[in-house]
Amino acid sequence: MVAVAAAVLLLLASGCSEKLARQKGLSDADLLARGQKSADLKKYENAVEAFQLLIERYPNSPLAPRAQFSLASCRASMKDYLEAEVAFDDFLRLYPADPKVPDALYMKGDLLHKQIQAVGRSQDKTREAIEAYKLFLRKEPDSPRSAAAVARIKEMRSLLVTHEEAVVSHLLSRKLYESAEVRAKRVIGEYPDAAPTPKLLSLLAEALEKQGKKDEASEVVKARDDKFPQQGSGKR
């Protein structure tokens, strides 16, 4: 009798020791409620199991969008970034008219922002985060979160330029002057007002000069000094 009571207590304490998938008769509402309760208790693995099962068993349920969004949120809370990205992308693809779309875009941007790598390493997540925040701003241009999204975009654009400066510098060090010129021009065109642009202009001038394009190099230096006089006059 004591053993039975202990087993019951263990079952209650764990929420459920039997896999949800083995339990019969659970409706979509039951699964959503279980998932939400587990998420509130920060038992994210249990929450993910419930939301995933709802989506699999009841893909056409009116509760499926909530389950998909909650699944993505739980994955993000677990720092399971790859699965969270996939879950957010599925939500945005399957339910483009859902009221939670702006939230999903902002949260996806936040998730990607956390994965940004240092200058010199892949900046794919930086670019993806910028796109997510830009899509969010189209949905909510004047929401309280808009200022934070705009600030994040500005920060990441500056990071991308700094990264490109390092790439152009590397190309120059390898005497790949034409490649350095092409890359610098592309970046200057994409990010004309980012803070590191004066340095990039200097690198472009160097790449041009090394190719014997002295007149064009002088024009770049003049443009840099006219636009950014605080950077110094005529220095390359």
Image (spheres, rainbow, N blue to C red):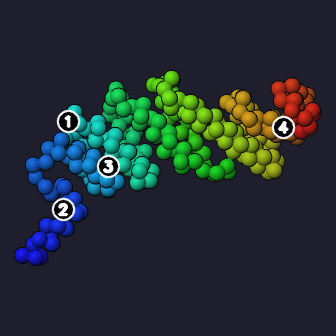
Residue type beneath disc 1 = Ser
* Horizontal side, residue 86 vs residue 54: left or right: right
* Horizontal side, residue 191 vs residue 59: left or right: right
Residue lying at 28% horizontally and 52% vertically, measured from the top left: 38
Q: Residue beneath label 3, please?
A: 40
Determine which of the numbered discs, if any, sits on residue 12 in the image: 2
* Horizontal side, residue 70 vs residue 117: left or right: left
Determine which of the numbered discs, if any, sits on residue 61 in the image: 1
Camera-side mark, 2 or 1: 2
Residue occupying the far left of the picture: 1
Return the x and y of residue 178 as percentages of the image width and height: 78, 39
Q: Residue beneath label 4, please?
A: 202
Residue type beneath disc 3 = Asp
The answer to whether one can see residue 55 in this image is yes
41 and 205: which one is in front? 41
Distance from Cα at disc 4 to Cα at disc 1: 59 Å
Q: Earlier in the sequence, mark 2 or mark 3?
A: 2
Camera-side mark, 3 or 1: 3
